[in-house]
Amino acid sequence: MHSNDILKRIASQIETNPDLADEDKIQLLKNIRHLSEERMNILVTGGTGCGKSSTINALFNADRAKVGTGASPETQRVARYELDNLVIWDTPGFGDGKVEDENHKRNIIRKLHEPDPKNPNRLLIDLVLVIIDGSTRDLGTAFDLINNVIIPNLGEKKEERILIAINQADAAMKGYGWDRQNHKPTPELTKFLEEKVEDVKNRIFKSTGVKVDPIYYSAGFTDPGGKQETSYNISKLLYYIIEKSPAEKRLVIGSQANAYRMKTSTQNDDERNYREAAEREVEESTTSSILGTALSGASIGYKFGGPIGGVIGGVVGGAIGFFKSACYITTATCRANALPDDCYELQTLRNYRDTWLVNQPDGPYLINRYYDTAPQIVDKIDQRPDSESVYKMIKAEYIDPCVSLIEQHNYETCKQKYMEMVNALSKM
């Protein structure tokens, strides 16, 4: 769901809230309009073959950037990708030649100094994501890019505008030490990767005086045969990006997160649940940005954490795919039919999605397409005066038959039935 669609839902609930003073409604709606105009610009750079495009796809909805899998680099110039109010600048890879690298450096420096056209007093690029190839020991090109190009041209608050990410953790020891069954590093490989993080951190600080906190991960990719590799630590990388982003722009990032990859990415490198941490960051920063200064008079009890804060946070959290289980239509249908979130129907369909559908050639594409369209479908149904009867129809004509087909192991027919439902509801 686009960030502006989420903001519209919040605005609608504020406008119809009888407990808010008119002057407070005006201020809150003004703050929402301001947020709707915010654009988040991320510059992604690194050496050739480090996995920039794969990382973009893993983070922000698949296939928005075509991934190079052949012999030639896929991206030959700074490419611009727009996802709602999120703008990603994907630079060419470094290391293909001195002349090419010098041209790339000049283009990056120019982009880092470019002012925001809507606010000339601030720079266009909010965050630089530097991706390092974790499969190689030769980091000379990466350190030259970071120490001599990126950091000297970040302006003030350099540490807030750069994030170092070490990709291809699975190949860091030439494939040795990677638990392929569970899609995560063994203790031996984890130790190696943590030492690499410390080495990168110390070398950058020694050369520039700037403190960075690198993260290692594996973006995964879709090979030419259509097989989807599982990502590792991608939700942690997303959390780091959100944390480093301006508070008023975090909703833009959260609303474009790749829900499927966030859910299926394997265990992070520590015990923290980064999907939940990202949820809190987006909800709290968006709520705080909308509420702004203290509300007045009779509305003073509706500050952050109170009813209005809860309404805002609830809309944000409920709308962003990577926070929830992401069975939007089924979840809404079951709730409308007074069934709990762990009811048999939901558990059956979630298990079907996560164990059978995801492993089909078209599975990841269908799941991502569903995540893109289902929130809008639910929103439209909720606005109908006959929403209750619509949800009863969905359960009787689609959900119950799908569950029955799964019980009969008729998985392909179930897929066709669910696609039929989504297509039918999209036309309502």
Image: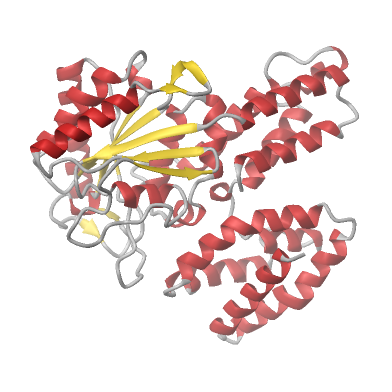
- Residue 175 locus on image (x, y percent): 16, 57
Q: Give the side of residue 177 with respect to residue 38, left or right.
A: left
Q: Which residue is drawn at 44% across and 56% down?
A: 62
Task: Name the quadrant of the C terminus.
Answer: bottom right
Quadrant location of residue 305?
Answer: top right
Q: Which residue is drawn at 36% across and 54% down?
A: 231
User: Taking 276 as reference, is 21 above or below it?
Assistant: above
User: Taking 276 as reference, is 419 above or below it?
Assistant: below
Q: Is residue 198 visible?
A: no
Question: Toward the viewer: 229 or 76?
Answer: 76
User: Taking 288 as reference, is 412 above or below it?
Assistant: below
Q: Give the side of residue 292 with respect to residue 223, left or right.
A: right
Q: Residue at x 68, y 54 (%)?
A: 376
Total marks placed? 0
- Residue 406 locus on image (x, y percent): 60, 80
User: Taking 411 as reference, is 154 above or below it?
Assistant: above
- Residue 49 locus on image (x, y percent): 20, 50
Q: Give the side of residue 289 with respect to residue 185, left or right.
A: right
Question: Toward the viewer: 28 or 329?
Answer: 28
Model colouring: secondary structure
Q: Which residue is drawn at 55% across and 43% down?
A: 84
Q: Is residue 194 visible?
A: yes
- Residue 413 locus on image (x, y percent): 59, 84
Question: Toward the viewer: 109 or 411?
Answer: 109
